[in-house]
Image: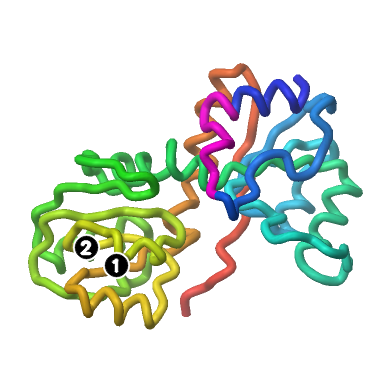
Amino acid sequence: MKISEIYKFLNELSPFELQESWDNSGLLLGDFNQDVKRVALSIDVDEALIDSLQNDTLLITHHPIILGGLKQLEFSKYPANLIKKMIQKNISNIAMHTNFDQTHLNEYVATEVLGYKISEKDGFVAYLDVNEDFDVFARKVSIAFSLPHAKCVKSSNFIKRVALTTGSGCSLIKSIDADCFLTGDVKYHDAMEAKSINLSLIDIGHFESECFFAEILLKYLKNLGLEAIISSSENPFTYI
């Protein structure tokens, strides 16, 4: 099957035009006319992952390895060091990032990982009716995402409505209409801002909240009759 055929299927599944203006989803490395023998799925690209892949693999990732504009390829620096290895092994790459967040990832995490129905969707935000004690809910969240602890901003003892954005969603804080916001990459000043507007926060981790990308996409590729493997990159963070 040619990359162009796979790309067409992916675009119908989760249109690339839905991506944010700053994003870089789509075919990043490769040739649309290239025949694909094997497909691998991963949230990211890292060196160990590239080393594990066979030559002539199509790698479909959540995060784009090329995000900002590349002005040079200095092979001792990221991401050129990884791109060089990919080219040497003829590894193609399609990224499905913010388009997939909107069409699949947030919904899957809400319903399959956390186990709640979505009461409302607003772009990158899924709203859930929870109606639970904050501490009980926070512990449930930490277990669902296999977090060693739940890093929280506790602004109230009881949570009625929760907003969810996988990955890094703190830029949306001002628009959140809920008692509690679940997202990753929560910084100190995000926490201060949330506390000032009486919004509880639970940091669900960037990797931890998006690592389901591959298993979601795998079932759709099976419907296409295409054999794919999950060969995920590792979380760059460790907890000691």
User: Callout 1: 10 Å neighbours few (<14), some, many (20+)?
Assistant: many
Residue 202 marker? 1
Q: Disc 2 residue type?
A: Cys
**Label 2 residue SS:** strand
Q: Are marks 2 and 1 in contact (CB under 8 Å)?
A: yes
User: Callout 2: 10 Å neighbours few (<14), some, many (20+)?
Assistant: many
**Residue 31 figure quarter:** top right
Up the image or down, 120 lies above or below 141; here it is above
Residue 180 marker? 2
Q: Position of residue 58 (x, y in %)?
A: 74, 36
Segment tinted magenta in the rendering: 11-20
- Residue, x 19% and y 75% (percent of image)? 154
Residue 130 lies in the magenta-colored region: no
Of the pair 116 and 4, the residue shown nearer to us? 4
Q: Position of residue 71 (x, y in %)?
A: 83, 64
**Label 1 residue SS:** strand
Q: Name the chief secondary structure element in magenta.
A: helix
Q: Disc 1 residue type?
A: Ile
- Residue, x 47% and y 61% (percent of image)? 206
| Distance Cα–Cα, label 2 vs label 1 | 7 Å
Q: Disc 2 or 1, which lies upstream in sequence?
A: 2
- Residue, x 22% and y 65% (percent of image)? 138
